[in-house]
Image: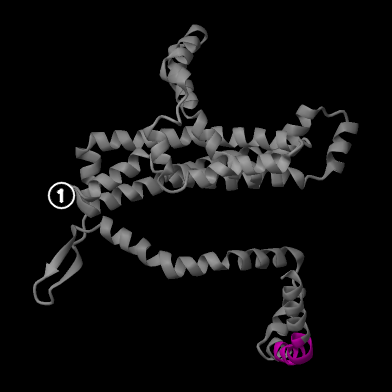
Amino acid sequence: MKLKIANILKSIGRFYKDKLERPLTKVAMFLYVYLGVRWLVKKYQGLTERTRNRVTGLMFVSPWFVGLYMFGIRPFLNSIRMSLADQAQYIINTQTQTVEFVLKGWTFKHLTNLIKNQPGHIQTITSVFADVALVVPLVLVFSLVLALMLNQGVKGKGIFRVIFFIPVILLSGNLLSYFNQYNLLSVPAVANGLIARQINRFLPGQFTGLIIDAFEKIVLILWLSGVQTLIFLAGLQKRNQAIYEAAAIDGASMWDSFWKITLPSLQNLMIINVIYTVIIYANLSNNALIGLINQTLVDVRFGRSYSSVLAWVLFLIELVIIGAYTLVIKLSNRRYN
């Protein structure tokens, strides 16, 4: 069987070389010349290295821009319109006997209703903001520590990479809700108050809540650190060892090298991980604000416009947290630039 497959592949190869290679080459050269590809290549080669890198980056993200234009712009604008609509609902057109979605009026009453009349919803928003703001630095620190450990020449490094990436697959879909339902994301020592009692023995009570919140999410933080660990590991493996050797000759310790060389060199990767972590964590199915959005969507007291306002509030939370941590990272690394 293998011999027959090999003979078939050889026949295909000979047919391509004898019959197709030359005409296809001519067609490719014709297109290369007369479609302006050769002119673009010459222009690209004449650019400076910095400009070429920018053009290459734009080429890589261009599929995203195309997808955003085709599938994202219209829902984005519809969401803005819906959040400012006085009425947004499906109605039955008696003339055509069809169901139509109708938007009427322009108003800020849904945002005003949220701020003035819904203290429970405001409390949910503030708790989600604090939750996301707490989890992001914990995930970054944990993933950086894992990346530093894996970068020390550990045997079976590829297996560990797969293990850290498995939660990314398992957290997709509705599996997270089942894990949360059966308390598989909680730590028993936190649930029975053992850790809280031990912390109260050594620290003031105002710190206990913050530390307990971190311990309650330790399993989820571990699960959320897979992609970030791989990103940090890729950055660590591209370090210039000559810089560390020069620093060691000048008397720098490993601790000094970490703070003054390793950490500043990972600045851009930190920003990428901040963006990724905020977006992933803020949109998990166990997010209380997402649950509130789904609840108000079908509640006749609120409706789609109010739900759309809550969705924009969640979006603003993500922007504020990303901007704040990005600013902190840039300011902390300014002295090394």
Q: What residue is shown at x 25% (from left), y 57% (from top)?
A: 84
Q: Can residue 222 be seen in this snapshot?
A: yes
Residue holding disc 1: 300
Q: Is residue 136 magenta?
A: no
Q: 4 left or right of 245?
A: left
Q: Which quadrant, please, contains the N terminus?
A: bottom right
Q: What residue is shown at x 20% (from left), y 51% (from top)?
A: 303
Q: In the depicted view, which residue is nearer to us: 276 or 265?
A: 276
Relative to 165, does residue 192 appear above or below in the rendering? above
Q: Tell me which corner region of the image, top left, top right, bottom left or bottom right, holds residue 320.
A: top left
Image coordinates for residue 139, horizontal then vertical, percent: 56, 35
Magenta stretch in the rendered image: 15-28
Q: What residue is shown at x 37% (from left), y 67% (from top)?
A: 74
Q: Which quadrant, please, contains the C terminus?
A: top right
Identity of the amino acid at label 1?
Answer: Val
Q: Tell me which corner region of the image, top left, top right, bottom left or bottom right, holds residue 26.
A: bottom right
Label count reads: 1
Specify the principal SS of the magenta part. Answer: helix
Q: 297 left or right of 20?
A: left
Q: In the depicted view, which residue is nearer to us: 191 or 277?
A: 191
